[in-house]
Image (cartoon, rainbow, N blue to C red):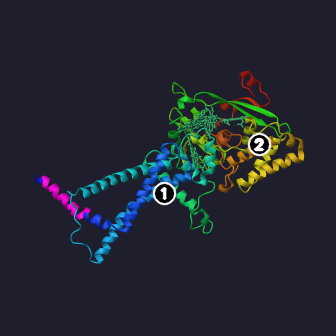
Amino acid sequence: MDTREDNVSAFNQFRENWIRPALFFGNNPISLAGGAITTASALTMVGSWLIDLFGHGNGNPYLGIIFFLILPAFFILGLLLIPVGVFLRRRKLQKAGQIPAVFPTIDLNDHVFRHGLDVVLVATIANMLIVMLASYKGVSYMDSPQFCGQSCHVMAPEFAAYQVSAHSNVACTECHVGSGIDSYVRAKMNGTKQLVEVTLHPFAKLAPKLIPDYPTPIPSPVTSLRPAREVCESCHTPAKFVGDKLLVKTSYADDEANTAAQTVVLLHIGGRDSLSHLSGIHGVHLNHMEYIASSADRQTIPWVTRRNGDGTETTFAASALNGATPKGERRTMDCIDCHNRATHTFQTPEEGINQALSDGAISTSLPWIHKEGLELLKANYASQAEAKAKIAQQLNAFYRSQHPDVLQSKGWLVQQAAAQIYAIYARNVFPEMKVTWGTHPNNLGHTAYPGCFRCHDGDHTSKTGKTITQDCANCHNLLAVEESKPKVLSDLGIAH
Ligand code: HEC
Ligand code: HEC
Ligand code: HEC
Ligand code: HEC
Ligand code: HEC
């Protein structure tokens, strides 16, 4: 009996001291406006989710910013305005001495009032649900490649390369944001910093010391990348990449006929076999190697050490070191040291044009197109828009003056070639971000960039005089080098 009476009196107190005053003071323009803002943004959000749910949503990241970031902010602003209004009205009435001794009565037996209480209760629960859903939506939106790659033109180079990569269905966050709340928060702080820098960018030039600006190009290596083996091996298990891989590359000569030639390489990728033996390129480096780079971009590596099966280490050092150990971070070699361009693979102009010619995107029947295309790709343009106009204009001018017959009979192939040459340019060169040919070197290989030869250059020697191998056959069998119609391809039944 007692407890029940206690409950009733507690409720009465709550009603006298809180609900009645809240209803009384809440009746003010600020609180009412807050309520209206909250309701309106809630209805809009619910509407946009329904549209999303039924599949009529649109992938535009700018709309996304409104629905997932700005509307929830309004929603919360509205909620905050309600107590602010209550507080102001109370203070004003207090000053004027108009606070009633007894607030207008509330009677729980009065069904109109009970109904009002129900409404307040239901509205509160609904509000909470909406805030929860909105923040969930906002968070998962900020995780989407649209947000990371498209909302912000600073990421344009990385996003363009990402879209045509084998990983175009892997979310940016899979590789760039670690698991756990701390790396999540760090990534979002980093993103917010970037957003601020992008917003302030137009003013940064006026006061370079005062106003932060984003770096152009965005530097790599990315020091905050989560540990590569943890990331990559969540999808690629080392047990699965055992064996050799046949690489066929087609290149074209700078002659009138764009003569094609092929290089065929059998790469000894290796990996871990069913008996846990490590072999080949993957096996030997993933066993355990550490190195020290002497340049921030890790392109110069004068010192590397390999842990042997018996626990001893063999160190290979560049001759210029004279036996000293260089200063710097001792990094354990992982996937990124070779696959640094696993997703954002920027091509060289040669790779771009060779690929377009062998795909048939640019017709090999156009005389001199390889040579002309390369020259147009390598020229300097102030912007992508200028590149687009000039490439088309100059390719046309070339055929008009040198091969008018071609322009007449195959004019549309010339237009198509111009469009494709520009497409290669636009995937790889971003003048606004100072990303151009060679800005982001690819470490996989050794022909265009140092790559493997950062260590396998014949100059890294151990104390016993052993040198890191430069023997071609250790890494690959060269089955054909720039041959036209190599026999090995027809033997294998590979068309060319
Ligand atoms: C499969 C993994 C993977 C995915 C998915 C991925 N990245 Fe990367 N990203 C990398 C690696 C690896 C590097 C280079 C790291 C290094 O060199 O240290 C990198 C580098 C970058 C850089 C630094 C500049 C540069 O080019 O080196 C930016 C910016 C970037 N990524 C943005 C993005 C964005 C935006 C997305 C999604 C649209 C994305 N990444 C998706 C792996 C990934
Ligand atoms: C979420 C899963 C996932 C993650 C994480 C991932 N990959 Fe992949 N990777 C794939 C898929 C799927 C393919 C495409 C396979 C295909 O198209 O045949 C692929 C293809 C590749 C290829 C060969 C295709 C090519 O031509 O580029 C390489 C090399 C590769 N990944 C390396 C990496 C590296 C290095 C990392 C870590 C930075 C990584 N992957 C992280 C799923 C993943
Ligand atoms: C010492 C350099 C090196 C390291 C370290 C390395 N790789 Fe590779 N990887 C290669 C080379 C070289 C190739 C073949 C390149 C090609 O296909 O053109 C390759 C190919 C691959 C492929 C594609 C296989 C196929 O069938 O196309 C995958 C997937 C891959 N690596 C994943 C990884 C992962 C995951 C790691 C880290 C655990 C890793 N690699 C570490 C050099 C390396
Ligand atoms: C950070 C330095 C470094 C880089 C970069 C590097 N390697 Fe190595 N590699 C080594 C060292 C050290 C050894 C072990 C040499 C020894 O023990 O004789 C080695 C051994 C090898 C071997 C085994 C050689 C043998 O004698 O059987 C192969 C194959 C190989 N590397 C291929 C590659 C390829 C392919 C790349 C580029 C994709 C590459 N390496 C990049 C340091 C490097
Ligand atoms: C440390 C390992 C290593 C050594 C030593 C090595 N290569 Fe390579 N080479 C590679 C890798 C890895 C690739 C594949 C690059 C890719 O995936 O595009 C390659 C590719 C090539 C290609 C194909 C062309 C191209 O543009 O990719 C040629 C040609 C070639 N190597 C020639 C040689 C010759 C000749 C030697 C001996 C003097 C040699 N390589 C030594 C690792 C090596």
The picture places residue 326, in percent across and down from the top left corner, at 59, 49
Labelled pair 1, 2 in contact (Cβ < 8 Å): no
Instruction: Write down the region rendered in magenta.
Output: 3-19
What residue did someone put label 1 on?
Answer: 70
C-alpha span from label 1 to label 2? 43 Å
Q: Is residue 286 above or below residue 215?
A: above
Q: Position of residue 191 (x, y in %)?
A: 52, 54
Q: Nearer the viewer, residue 40 or 347?
A: 40
Q: Nearer the viewer, residue 316 or 44?
A: 44
Would residue 253 be found to the left or right of residue 107 on screen? right
Is residue 235 shown in magenta?
no
Q: Nearest the camera: 288 or 340?
A: 340
Q: Which residue is mark 2?
A: 416
Give the vertical position of 131 relative to 306 (above or below). below
Q: Position of residue 285 (x, y in %)?
A: 57, 36
Q: Position of residue 452 (x, y in %)?
A: 65, 39
Residue 425 visible in the current orientation:
yes
Disc ID at residue 223: none
Q: How many marks?
A: 2
Question: In the shown orientation, is residue 407 left or right of residue 279?
Answer: right
Amino acid on which disc 2 is placed: Gln
> Secondary structure of the magenta portion, mostly?
helix
| SS class, disc 1 | helix
Taking 273 as reference, is 179 left or right? Answer: left
